[in-house]
Image (cartoon, rainbow, N blue to C red):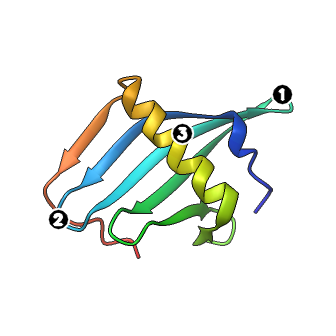
């Protein structure tokens, strides 16, 4: 997966799965003249954060600074009133 520039992510919307305490978040990465859509999965129970690697058809776990940056940006996006959709179900992805 090409290295994501986490500092320039702009989150578009969030989907919360209340039954399994997970959150999907969609973001745009604007850099080098191209816009890329990035997907993230956060397990609120464990604190694990994953980024979707579409080329490898897999989820990659983020650690350290990248994890913290994504969580901080999701919190900031929520505080800036981006759409948050709540579903009483499970995501079934991982």
Q: Is residue 68 left or right of residue 29?
A: left
Q: Position of residue 78 (x, y in %)?
A: 38, 33
Question: Which of labels 1 and 2 is toward the front?
Answer: 2
N-term mark: 3 or 2: 2
Which numbered disc, 1 or 3, marks the residue closer to the eye?
Answer: 3
For the residue carrying disc 1, how many other residues have a C-alpha within 10 Å: few (<14), some (14-19), or many (20+)?
few
Q: Which mark is residue 23?
A: none
The residue located at (20%, 45%) in the rendering is: 86
Look at mark 2 in the image and give the residue it sits on: 19
Q: Residue at x 23, y 68 (%)?
A: 20
SS class, disc 2:
loop
Q: Quadrant of residue 65?
A: bottom right
Q: Earlier in the sequence, mark 1 or mark 3?
A: 1
- In this figure, what is the number of numbered marks? 3
Q: CA distance from mark 1 to mark 2?
A: 39 Å
Q: Position of residue 39 (x, y in %)?
A: 53, 52
In the rendered image, residue 19, in percent from the top left (x then y), is placed at 17, 65
Q: Are marks 1 and 3 in contact (CB under 8 Å)?
A: no
Task: Identify the element where label 1 is drawn.
Answer: loop
The residue singled out by tag 3 in the image is 73
Residue 45 image offset from top left, x and y in percent: 32, 69
49 relative to 34, above or below? below
65 over 12 or under it: above or below: below
Residue identified by numbered label 1 = 33
């Amino acid at each position: 997966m090409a290295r994501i520039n986490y500092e320039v992510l702009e989150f578009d919307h969030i989907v919360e799965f209340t039954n399994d305490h997970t959150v999907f978040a969609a973001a745009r990465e604007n850099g080098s003249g191209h816009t890329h859509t990035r997907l993230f999965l956060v397990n609120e129970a464990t604190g694990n954060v994953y980024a979707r690697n579409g080329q490898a058809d897999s989820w990659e776990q983020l650690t350290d600074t990248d994890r913290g940056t994504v969580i901080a940006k999701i919190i900031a996006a929520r505080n800036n009133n981006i759409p948050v959709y709540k579903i009483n179900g499970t995501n079934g992805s991982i």
